[in-house]
Amino acid sequence: MPQSREERVATLATANRERHARKRRDVEGAIKGLLRANDTVTISSVAKRANVSRNFVYVQTDLLEVVREVAHKQPHRLRQSGGGSSAEASLRARLVLALDGMARAKEKVERLEATVERLTGEVAHYMEADRSSSQPSGIPEGAVVEMRRPRT
């Protein structure tokens, strides 16, 4: 059955969000991989390893900041400033944990945003059905309906 224009647009928007999220995960994975391999972290090396454009990394300001921060704390710079291998290992471990936490938080935000979108659509659907229905909804006209967020 052919989809309506709105359904096609929604499908494309969903695919775009998923592609964008996948690219972000790929960049985060590239940063982790470069650190594990003890390779130099630069915008170019991250973009190449993640198979994204350098422009994508530059536009994602939070990822750009992570890349710059990691590049600034590269082992050769730590050695120049007198840092030892235990400091390097500690910083690497903390960075990997921070990146993992950031990825989990972003996934949770994406799931919550999808839930909000779905629920907003359902509310709109019920409101439209209520407007077009000749039967009352059971909620007095003019009543204030409070919506609360579910606890997580």
Image: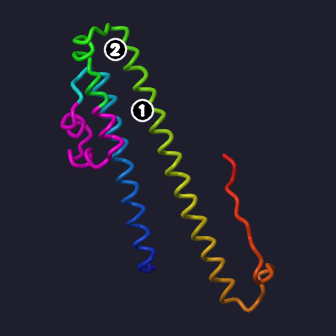
Q: Find numbered disc 1 in the image and state the secondary structure of the residue it sits on.
A: helix
Q: Residue furthest front?
A: 81
Q: Position of residue 108 (x, y in %)?
A: 53, 46
Among the 4 quarters of the image, the one containing residue 142? bottom right
Q: Which mark is residue 146?
A: none
Q: Position of residue 73 (x, y in %)?
A: 29, 22
Give, as a three-letter code, the residue at label 2.
Glu
* Residue type indicated by callout 1: Leu
Q: Residue at x 28, y 49 (%)?
A: 59
Q: Is residue 22 left or right of residue 103?
A: left
Q: Residues within 10 Å of mark 1 (few under 14, many from 20)?
A: some
Mark 2, Cα crowd under 10 Å, few <14 / some 14-19 / many 20+, is some
Q: Please determine whether, in this image, residue 144 is positioned above or below residue 91.
A: below
Q: CA distance from mark 1 to mark 2?
A: 16 Å
Residue to which mark 2 is pinned: 88
**Residue 65 placement (x, y as % from top left):** 32, 37
Residue in front for this viewpoint, 144 or 92 = 144
* Mark 2: secondary structure: helix
Q: Is residue 44 magenta?
A: yes
Question: Which residue extends farthest bottom?
Answer: 134
Pointer 1 residue: 99
Of the two numbered discs 1 and 2 on the same chain, state the one appearing first in sequence. 2
Query: Residue 103 placed where, x, y %?
Result: 45, 39
The residue range painted magenta reads 42-68
Against 128, residue 12 (above or below) is: above
